[in-house]
Amino acid sequence: MEWRWDWVWELAPRFVDATGKTLIAAGGGYTIAIILGLVFVLAQRTPLLPVTLVVREFVELIRSTPLLLQIFFVYYVGPQFGLTLSPWTAGLIAIGVHYGAYLSEVYRGGIESVPKGQWEAAKAINLPIVTTYRRIVIPQALPPAVAGMGNYLVGIFKDTPMLSVIGVAELMHTATAVGAESYRYLEPYTMVGAIFLAVSLPSAFAINVFEKWVRRTLGMTK
């Protein structure tokens, strides 16, 4: 099958628009995930045992089931419980909760990397827990967590095609629609792959640079 450059240029505006929507979906889902991940990890460190157990089991449930199933559950099962959401909202919530569970483990690893002596010293001088986290724990927990947080950002971007199953007009949905209209799938799917590479590779490089900057800023490099 011959590659049609003229047709590719005709399709460009549609794919530019779809790329923007994909980036919005990834950014929105990641923002939710960052917040929920922090909530999940702090809830598991509370002295209230029932809260800890419930949140821990919920996180394990989310991590043990596929994102696609969770998207279907939020969008199609939600209305049976009075929760009717648009495809966009359902998709963002599903992605946010799914990756929030994974980010909570990234946060947990970072927090647990802080030496116990730091916690004991803060407790010995009666430092409030909020201040302990803000001034002592987070600055030391952040560098080990940055790489994992960045990887999940790229992961969210690459998982946005799953939203096409509920009608979100992101890149994969657009490519499939174009293919169905023209009966040509080579160009649209190749374009999608190229766009994902064009975004993912520079993002991975930027995450590396950011991690080094954080370590240097906090004086954690040699």
Image (cartoon, rainbow, N blue to C red):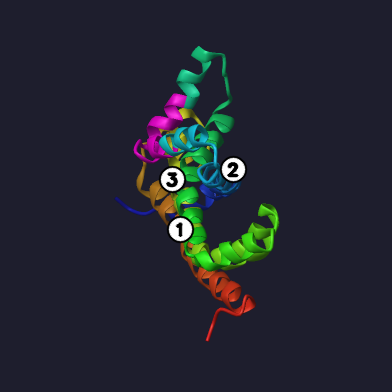
Magenta-span inclusion, residue 61: yes
Q: Check disc 3 and give the amino acid type.
A: Asp
Q: Nearer the viewer, mark 3 or mark 2?
A: 2
138 or 12: which is nearer to us?
138
Q: Mark 1 points at which residue?
A: 109
Inspect the magenta stretch and tell me whether residue 130 lies in it: no
Amino acid on which disc 2 is placed:
Ile
Q: In which quarter of the image is residue 124?
A: bottom right
- Give SS at disc 3: helix
Give yes or no for contact between labels 2 and 1 (Cβ–Cβ under 8 Å): no
User: Residue 128 at x, y = what percent?
Assistant: 70, 54
Left or right: residue 193 versus residue 93 is left
Residue with the mark numbered 3: 159
Q: How far from the left and from the top, in percent, is residue 222? A: 52, 86
User: Real-space Cα distance between discs 2 and 1?
Assistant: 20 Å
Image position of 199 (left or right of 3): right
Going by the image, does 99 lie left or right of 88?
left
Q: What amino acid is labelled 1 in the image?
A: Gly
Q: Nearer the viewer, residue 199 or 79?
A: 79
Q: Residue 32 shows which numbered tag?
A: 2
Q: Which of marks 1 and 3 is in front?
A: 1
The location of residue 201, given as percent across then percent down, is 46, 65
